[in-house]
Image (cartoon, grey):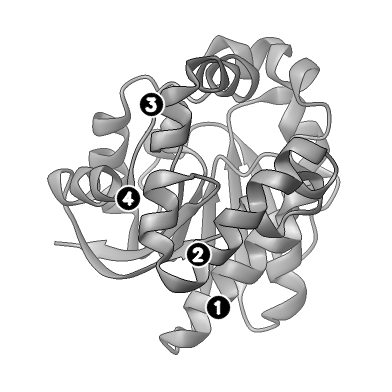
Amino acid sequence: MSIYQSGEYLEKNPHWHAADSAWKAAQILKMIRKHGLNPVTVCEVGCGAGEILNNLHAQMPETNFFGYEVSPQAYEICSAKSNERLQFTLGDLLETEVRFDLLLSIDVFEHVPNYLSFLEKLCGHADRFIFHIPLDLSLLTILRPKRLMRTREGVGHLHMFTAEMALAVLKDTGYEVTDSFFTAGGLELEKNQRRLRTVLANLPRRVLGKINPRLAARILGGYSLLVLAKPR
């Protein structure tokens, strides 16, 4: 975890993925509205630049938002966005006893060395959870191991999952999955439309994704899994 506290991660990812935040917030809102959730308190663990919470805060006026972040560099970015309904803490949520109506873990636990222990401890901090989990393992990425290593070294994914593995991990660590759906960041995020190689790869990904997103994720990659869960 020292790369997040030393400044190394910020050096490799200067904007802490803030450009993706509006899209991620839209996926979260889709799940919240689908299930008619009306949380009074929402917390994001590993909130980074705080831009996901900032987007949600603008669209959920009756909700109070809290972000926890262990990186001093990310905290410096997110804390500037604080207001009456949006608060940030530099520290480890798992070292507290606070509890929330809804807890967000958005592209987080794949970064944590002991992710099983992390998820088990996290389970006691909310009534509902929304996870967004990158699905780095696909037939295409297994055939291109250099790409997997770039993901590990560039954005710090220590653990990599398929959809089935991600759901099994949540079950094993004390969660009951209520709903899940695939998100197509590989297709929809603006940054993925800039490189010709990615644009060409997205053609079959788009076609297969409309027919069977699970199969598209398994073969071609470019997808993540958004999961709504509760403690068992």
Q: Which mark is residue 30?
A: 1
Where 141 falls versus 48 (above or below)?
above
Q: Is residue 112 left or right of residue 20?
A: left
Q: Label 2 is placed on what type of residue? A: Gly
Q: Is residue 81 left or right of residue 219?
A: right
Task: Where is residue 93? Give x, y as percent.
Answer: 45, 40
- Where does label 3 land, which residue? 159
Which residue is painted at 65% across and 19% down in the image?
A: 154
- Where does label 2 land, which residue? 209
User: Label 4 crowding class (10 Å Cα cut-off): few <14, some 14-19, many 20+?
Assistant: many
Q: Between label 2 and label 1, give the one nearer the viewer.
A: 2
- Where does label 4 land, which residue? 163
Residues at discs 3 and 1 in contact (Cβ within 8 Å): no
Q: Label 1 is placed on what type of residue? A: Lys
Which residue is painted at 73% across and 14% down in the image?
A: 7
Q: CA distance from mark 4 to mark 2?
A: 14 Å
Task: Where is residue 9? Give x, y as percent.
Answer: 69, 18
Pointer 4 or 2: first along the chain: 4
Q: Label 3 is placed on what type of residue? A: His
Pointer 2 or 1: first along the chain: 1
Q: Quadrant of the C terminus?
A: bottom left
